[in-house]
Structures are given as C-alpha cells and as structure tokens.
Image (spheres, grey):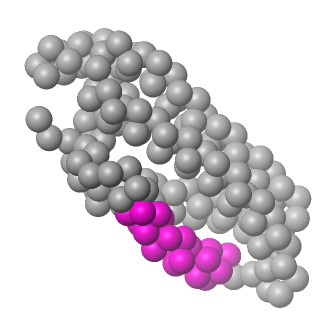
Amino acid sequence: MKKILHTLFHTPILLVLSIFLLGIPEVSHADACLETYIDLLRSDIKAKKADILHDALELNKKESEIFWAIYKDYEWEMEGLWEKRLAVKKKILENKLQPRTLKELEGKWFTIQESRIKLWRKYYQKYSKALPPAKAATWLLTEYELNLLMDVKTQCELPQVTK
C-alpha cells in the first residue's frame, strides 16, 4: 500500500485521481446489494431535486412546462454518465487500486467528467434560448450543486476502503 501511495502522490498526472480514489468504497457484499444501495441513495436526492429546482427557479406555468420538458431529456443523458462513472468505480474496487489499472481508469474518469461539463453546457444553452437568462444560470448553478451533493452523499454513505 505504501508503494501505491508513493506512486500516486509522486506522479503529477495521478495526483487528482488519487484524491478521488482514496475515498472509493470497498465492495464487501454482493454487487446486487451495492447496486440497490446506490439506487436508494440516488433516489433519495432525486426525489427532493424537483422540489429544490422548482423553488430555486420560480417558474411560471409556461416556463415550467418548457423547463420540465427539457429537463426530462437532460436527466436521461445525465443518468447515462452516472452509470459510466459507477462502472469506473466498480472497476477500481475490483482491482484494489492496482497501479497498472490506474492509467486506464484515469482516462475514463476524466472523460466522464469532461462529458458532464459538456452536458451542462449543452443544456444551459437550451435553457438560455427557452427561458430568461437568469433562470438558465440559476438552473446551471443549482444543478451543479445538486450533482456535487449526490456525489458526496454516495461517496460518504458507501462502505469505505479498508486494508
């Protein structure tokens, strides 16, 4: 473990990834149980997400119809990225942070994060055309914060890596 940590913290390209990886939970039970638990965590935040967005955006009836029609497509695309991200986490856990695997996984992780930003940009542009610019900006900032919350909640509530 010391050798892995030494390699991670002394290789600049892996520094950011190592911060992410050290908090990765260990799979100590069947994948089906882990999947169920992750789904519960996500559904808890998703259930509150609509209310939070509704309150933050203060949409009138017409804006609300436009917003939620676009948001349905956004959620579908974001769900795909979430699944890819979980697949990378699982792969990391399966390989117990083996250095030979990190190079491959770091590329996938950064690609997913870049795709997430592209998706936010894409939907921000759609909202900017369909809604007042201030509401599009409010959506972007609120959505970003909610995604961070979901990331942290999932990370914190899953079992943590042990020796």
Which of the image's four quarters has the C terminus? Answer: top left
User: Residue 117 colored magenta?
Assistant: no
Q: Which residue is depicted at the point 47% across and 18% down?
A: 104
Instruction: Report x, y in % for residue 24.
Output: 30, 41
Q: Nearer the viewer, residue 99 or 51?
A: 99
Q: Is residue 30 above or below residue 42?
A: above
Which of the image's four quarters has the N terminus? Answer: top left
Q: Which residue is depicted at the point 87% across and 82% down?
A: 62
Instruction: Report x, y in % for residue 59.
Output: 75, 81
Left or right of 148? Residue 112 is: right
Left or right of 14? Residue 78 is: right
Q: Which residue is depicted at the point 65% across and 80% down?
A: 54
In this picture, which residue range is highlighted in magenta? 36-57
Whether residue 155 is visible here, answered yes or no, is: no
Left or right of 127? Residue 148 is: left
Q: Nearer the viewer, residue 12 or 21?
A: 21
Instruction: Report x, y in % for residue 35.
Output: 43, 56
Total label count? 0
Which secondary structure dominates the residues rendered in magenta? helix
Q: Quadrant of residue 94?
A: top left
User: Residue 46 colored magenta?
Assistant: yes
Whether residue 32 is visible here, answered yes or no, is: yes
Q: Which residue is depicted at the point 54% across and 71% down?
A: 46
Q: Quadrant of residue 70?
A: bottom right
Q: Nearer the viewer, residue 111 or 41?
A: 41
Q: Is residue 77 above or below residue 19?
A: below
Q: Is residue 55 above or below residue 35?
A: below
